[in-house]
Image: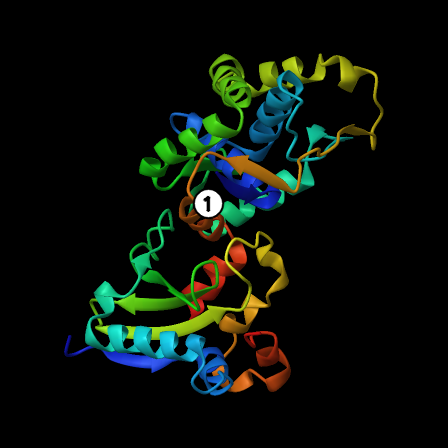
Amino acid sequence: MAGYSITWHKVFCYQYEHLKKNSLLKRQVDKQLEVIQRNPQQAGAPLRYLPSDLAGKIRRLYVGGPGKYRMFIKTDDKKQEVKIGFIDPRLRGKLDYGDLPLEIFTLPEDEIDEKMLRKFLLK
Amino acid sequence: MGIISNETFKRLFLLYTIGQFKNGVYGKLRLNKIVYLILRKHPELIPFEFKHDRYGQHSDELDTINEQLSYMSHTTAVPLEAGRGNRYALEKKENMDFYKVVLGYISPKLKKAIDEIVVQNGYLPEQDLRKKAYCDELFLKSEEGDILLKENLPKKIKVDLSAEDCEDLALSLDPKFIAAMRHM
């Protein structure tokens, strides 16, 4: 789908740089990136039950095989923009969302340092 | 069979309770008293600790989660005409059907207790509601500063929903996740 501008958040850039070459995970991430590039509206599925301002904008994609990782992107169809957010380093089904420093996304990207980024490394 | 965390349950419980009020809940005091009465009726799943403080039965955690629900825009907080406090109402009423189903799976008795207490006491004049709450046996035996109810939720709660439904519910009610997605 032409016209969508796609940007990567610093967290995703860091995660991508640290993916093992030729690993299944990297291949799957690359495949999902291709899908996003082709047609962001067909990438994964939108999260449900979100507040109105986010409804339909946050999409979840699975990477790394069944029961593995969730990747989150934010789309804005009006502005034709996609932001690749991050791959959640916690395995699917893990309940405690409190242990990942998600506040990193509320910071300007140039204020994010390596120490914070390390917590998002995929094992 | 899916699983939700105790934190997700707390937010779901409060959203459902607020959603049961036709035009929203008038003030934090009313919300505190109604939730207390619900939990006295159904003490098997207590999401919030309640203390005896100078306003009677009160839960700090309930107030915090109420604020978070409002911050996430799951509820609206409209200032009351009297100028003191807010009216809290559900923002997306269409989600209520889903909350109802989930709560019904977890505990039909708790859901019933919420429904009944809101109808019976939710719309009482504030003075009458206070009177009703202050008649509670546990409260009468306590002193200011005493803990009236202790949270007793298990860390994980089983729900007859798919893993994806549970994930969507948990993420949509997670204030950190919502803040992250808004700023991203």
Which residue is at 66% across, 14% downward?
Answer: B131
A63 versus B114 height, above or below? below
Which residue is at 15% across, 74% downward?
Answer: A1
SS type, badge 1: helix
Q: Which residue is mark 1?
A: B166
Q: Position of residue B60 (x, y in %)?
A: 68, 41
Q: Which amino acid type corresponds to the residue marked 1 in the rendered image?
A: Cys
Of B156 and B62, nearer the camera is: B156
**Chain hosting mark 1:** B
Which colouring convention does the figure follow? rainbow
Q: Quadrant of the C terminus of chain A?
A: bottom right
A100 versus B128 height, above or below? below
A46 versus A65 height, above or below? above
Of A104 and B27, nearer the camera is: A104
Of A69 and A60, nearer the camera is: A69
Which residue is at 54% across, 68% downward?
Answer: A89
**Horizontal side of residue B178 vs A90, given as left or right:** left
Q: Position of residue A101 (x, y in %)?
A: 59, 68
A29 versus B86 height, above or below? below
**Horizontal side of residue B108 vs A38, given as left or right:** right
Farthest residue, direction left? A2
The crowding category of the residue bearing disc 1, from other C-alpha atoms within 10 Å (few below 14, some 14 to 19, many at least 20), is many
**Horizontal side of residue A13 vs A42, given as left or right:** right
